[in-house]
Amino acid sequence: NELLYGMKSRVHQPMNESQLIQDLNVLKRFYISKGYCKVEAKVWSKPGKLGYHIVTFEIKEGPCFRIKDIRFEKISVFTPKELLEKMKTKTWGWFSWLTKTGRFDEVIWQKDLEVIETAYRNKGYLDVEIERENIRLEEHGNHLRITIPVNEGICYKIHQISLNCDQGEDLEVLKQCI
């Protein structure tokens, strides 16, 4: 069963509460990867017979969201298309059932935000900030519209490079290498 694959707790093995919490997180991660980004999960145990415990995982899936649209606010350095191409999070499309795209996954989402910031920094925008507290996830039925506000900051450029040689290197040879 795909749902139980990542869990480490097994029947007839010693009960480990910290492992149950890890298994709970595995279950939540599984549901999130299937588009249930509002999944709620709990685990509890009660004593059974002969020293065994009965462990119950309660899962409330919530709605399954498909990403309808991803928008960016306050951008001028990149086009929305350029930023979307850098991200693994994609909108729902005709082949999403096959490619498994178009669903909101929190772990992938956080990595995507870091990828966007890195792209800006690589272009000299060292002060770029994605305003995480102002990201909007708007629900429309089972569709999700995401709006990402970006504060690009200013572009830093190198004005001058100077070389000082203390080992007797030929300064003109070094300048040609730059």
Image (spheres, grey):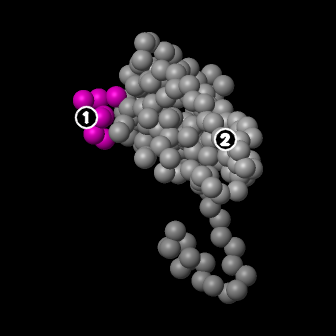
> Could you say which is closer to the camera, residue 174 or residue 55?
55
Considering depth in this image, is 47 or 100 the residue closer to the camera? 47
List x then y, in percent, for residue 63.
48, 20
Q: Residues within 10 Å of mark 1 (few under 14, many from 20)?
A: few
Kind of residue indicated by mark 1? Phe
Q: Is residue 13 left or right of residue 122?
A: right
The stretch in magenta equals: 92-99
For mark 1, give the secondary structure. loop
* Residue 28, quarter of the rendered image: top right
Q: Is residue 123 among what the camera can see?
A: no
Please name which of the two marks, 1 or 2, marks the residue nearer to the observer: 2
Residue 51: give x, y in percent of width and height: 75, 50
Confirm whether residue 48 shows in the render: yes
Few, some or many residues within 10 Å of mark 2 (<14, 14–19, 20+): few
Asked whether, in this view, residue 48 is left or right of residue 113, the answer is right
Q: In this orientation, which residue lies closer to the viewer: 106 or 78?
A: 106
Quarter of the figure with residue 45: top right
From the image, tell me which residue sits under label 2.
54
- 65 relative position to 6: left or right: left
Secondary structure of residue under mark 2: strand
**Which residue is depicted at the point 43% across and 47% down?**
1
Residue at 75% across, 41% down: 47
Q: Earlier in the sequence, mark 1 or mark 2?
A: 2
Q: Which residue is located at x 52 percent, y 68 percent?
A: 178
Q: Residue furthest left?
A: 94
State whether residue 76 is above or below residue 109.
Answer: above
| In the image, residue 93 lies in the stretch drawn in magenta | yes
Q: Work out whether residue 82 or residue 143 is closer to the camera in this orientation and state it.
A: 143
- The amino acid pointed to by label 2 is Ile
The image position of residue 111, as x and y in percent, is 54, 44
- Tell me the residue that label 1 is attached to: 95
